[in-house]
Image (cartoon, rainbow, N blue to C red):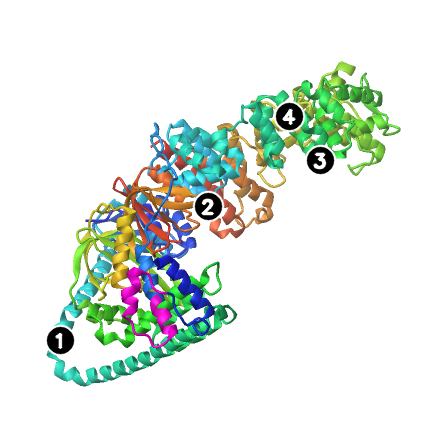
Amino acid sequence: MAPTLTREQVLALAPDASSLAAARKLSAPRAWLSAGHNDQALWGECKGSAKEPYRTQVELGALAVRCSCPSRKQPCKHSLGLLLLFATEPEAVAAAEPPPWVVEWLASRARAAERRQAKNQLAAPAAAADEATTAPAKRSTARTTAAREARVAAGVAELELWLQDRVRAGLAALPAQAPGNFLAFASRMVDAQAPGAARLLRLASTQVGVGAGWEGRLLARLSLLYLLARAYRNLAALPPAAQADVRTTLGFTQSQEELLAGPGLRDNWLVLGRRVEQDDRLQVQRTWLWGATSGKAALVLDYSAAGQPLDRSLTPGLCLDAELVFFPSAAPLRALVRARHGHCEPPALPLATLEEATGAYAAALAANPWIERTLLLAGPCTLARVEERWQLRDADGRLLPLPARFAPAWRLLALTGGRPFAMAGEWDGELLAPLCVQQDGRLIWMSEA
Amino acid sequence: MSDPHSYWQELAAAALVGTDRRPDLPPPPTPLAELLGSLDNESPAAALLSAAAATALYTRAGALPTTSEVAPISPCPEDDLPPCGPRAARHLATILDGHGWPLLREWLEVLATVRRRPPDAALPELLEQGRATPELRPALLAVLGKRGRWLAALNPEWSYVAEGAGPPQNEAELTELWQTGTRNGRMFLLKALRASDPARARALIQSTWATEKADDRAAFVEALEEGLSLEDEPFLEAALDDRGKEVRANAAALLARLPESALARRMAARAVELVSYHGGLFPKIELRLPEACDKALQRDGVEVKSRGGIGERAWWLSEIVRRTPPATWCAAWSLAPAAILSARMPREWRDTLIEAWTSAAVAYRDQAWAEALADLALKEPERVPLEELLPILPIERREALLIRMLDEGRQPLSGSHPALPALSAAREPWSVQLARSVIAALGRRFAGNAHDNSHREDWPLRAALENFAMAIPPELADEAIAALPANLAERPYWAGAGHAFIERLRLRREMRIALHE
């Protein structure tokens, strides 16, 4: 079944504002010499500055695009314009038989997908069968792993002492030294191959001397780092899931191939929203999914360095029949998409009071103390304004604070008319950053900015 | 025995000064005592960090959402009208993206005629536009619907919706607003009030007149232009003796728009002494320059120093004629304006006189003189500023004049065409007939030699295209677009303005079709 796209979903695909403006111009029927669609794909020919018209095509399943234009942006303005046209004036992109250039592209995509799948299926048995031949390689991998563990252990021991020294001398001495001493020590942690600890140190450095009661907020962050260092020292005594959380928080990465070989969870996954954040020189994209049958939340992370495009195929509003694989954790949240089987109708979001919703957060925190944010699902709720600040209010009159300048509030009010809705958002224990809202079955997205 | 929160405060305080100075930790609260007691710590610093980690997690996990007495926002009432369709909504998004408020106003006006309301999602931005641009408010208020009004009532920045397009009716509220408002707020209030109750507006100005600053007084007098009538004369006449120079000048300028005012009569008395008509076979007009600019003349708004690049005495004369009701001449000489204009005049004064008569015809809104001057403009376009006269002519007459200027002689429309200033200044949509004449003249500009590059530098015409795209009736979009050169891309000087013209005209046509869906 071809997914029905909304304008908002297409707008969310745009890599930047200028692409969007250009795409709006191309989203009128007259911009297209020809355009058509079938269950699998959209295609169109657009007159550009070149002699030949540009051939633009979109595979609807993964929202993969291809265009003969020279633009390096992904997706380009032609693809976005065609999608926008399809979303707003579907009758202008009539159902048709795909032209040869579309058929060819779809076939090559299908072949590539088959190859990938075959490789995945082969990976596990092949590994077992070829144990003998790969053993030397494995031994060398084991050596590098052992070397890394030793470096991390030394670094983390150093971290434990460094933290104790800060507390021994008193946090009051820090504003004169921060953030320099924090950043210098964070670099040591990078050298010790514990980039996760380095990141937490950088985050802690932003708290030093900022606002009244900063010492409390800083102490909370430093004490969790201390807990992390102690936990690593004590790693062998911890249950496997907790071990995984300690290692992940320190910055050990999990082999995705190994992970994909493990068990998955097939469900109808609704893409609730995504946020992009800058972390050091890396762009981090968080995409939140929710499984309609399992009721599980999943977080798909994507990283990109130096302006490389992020994977935008998990578009908010899509509902995928897909199989996800969760990273091991005492509170499993991060996941990979292993296989997409098709699209389905978006389900209704679950209802919960704010007390129940924050209770789920407390349970996750109890299982993994370093969890930074969880998916919060609540409803029926409304917006409330308390002392110039937007809050989410449930039927019991309980409140959770929304971000200080919550710009979408007026649009949200206009769309919901002040009637109750269900909301999904990122909750970090202090602020609720809304991702989407559902009312009468209709989903409304907050902008990704 | 403390609770976890105050325990946390004590831990933070201890961490701030350091365990070297404060090695002993406070006793932990009951829920944490067992856990913290079971930890073996190597040093006071380690003990503090362990206790802090446990307590931080304990309080974070246990935090409950707050409650509040704040009343929930009441839901909005159901709207009677359906929202516009998706294509119309898309056009609205395009317009909001940067087409300026005149096109937005047009969209809102068409929306009102098809009895639809704007898409809910666009309401905040529309209300924001209305806040920034008062010209939009009447059209916006007509289509906001119940949801839009409900939303506006929630945001103090959109209070203009509740206040309506007009000023508050309540007397106390009005006085309050006048006495405490900002300069802009007071000016807006004055303007709105002058439209509905001019006397009340004047009374407001007078109520605080003695305590206002000179530049505020000048602005208030200027605001009386809206709804000006002879009832304002006593106040304006008194303002001629004001301390502020600008106040006096503004009052004199307004009195010189009221043919029945004492100032107009005083000017007429001066004028007929200076300008005389001599009939006969070769009728002619003769002039005598004033000897001086006395105190009385200065009080009536004439400045001593010449500002027109002419001699002082000629300046005084032109100022007197400019402030004299033009009907004065017809009465004094028993002649129609056309006869007066065709009389011979001293060549060096003719331009000055015609310009002064044009100003007077506009100021006193004298139709007969405006018509006669417009006829003269057809013959001598460089002498008469037609664009000043047009606004006071009836619309049919105005359009007929422009059509004649465009069709006669079949001159291509260019930056130097005599009709261009008037066409660029048009604020109302054109009739089909006028639009066709404009389109034909525009077509002549681009017809012919493809290598003719004279229009490259024609920036007045290029700038006027933006206004043309708003004035041409949208059903003529294709004809108008065909008038532009087909190969716009090869004429880089024209490509930008040309494509904007095409896009806007098409949008105006298509948005109407979409709104009727």
- What is the distance, in whole Å, between disc 1 and disc 4 at their CAs? 93 Å
Let me know if marks 1 and 4 both belong to one chain: no
Rendering coords of residue A212 (x, y %)? 48, 58
Residue bearing the label numbered 4: B204
Q: Is residue B196 magenta?
A: no
- Front in this rendered view, residue B282 or A290: A290
Q: In this view of the protein, which residue sits in the foreground, B231 or B377? A: B231
Q: Is residue B14 left or right of residue A382?
A: right
Mark 3 to mark 1 CA distance (whole Å): 92 Å
Give the crowd class for mark 2: few <14, some 14-19, many >=20 residues within 10 Å: few
What range is drawn magenta here?
A: B27-51
Give the quarter of the image for residue A426: bottom left
Callout 1: few (<14), some (14-19), or many (20+) C-alpha neighbours within 10 Å? Answer: few
Residue A49 quadrant: bottom left
Please tell me whether mark 4 sits on a helix, a strand or a loop. helix
Q: Which sits earlier in the primary sequence, circle 3 or circle 4?
A: 4
Chain letter for the residue marked with disc 4 in the picture? B
Amino acid on which the number 1 mark rests in the picture: Ala
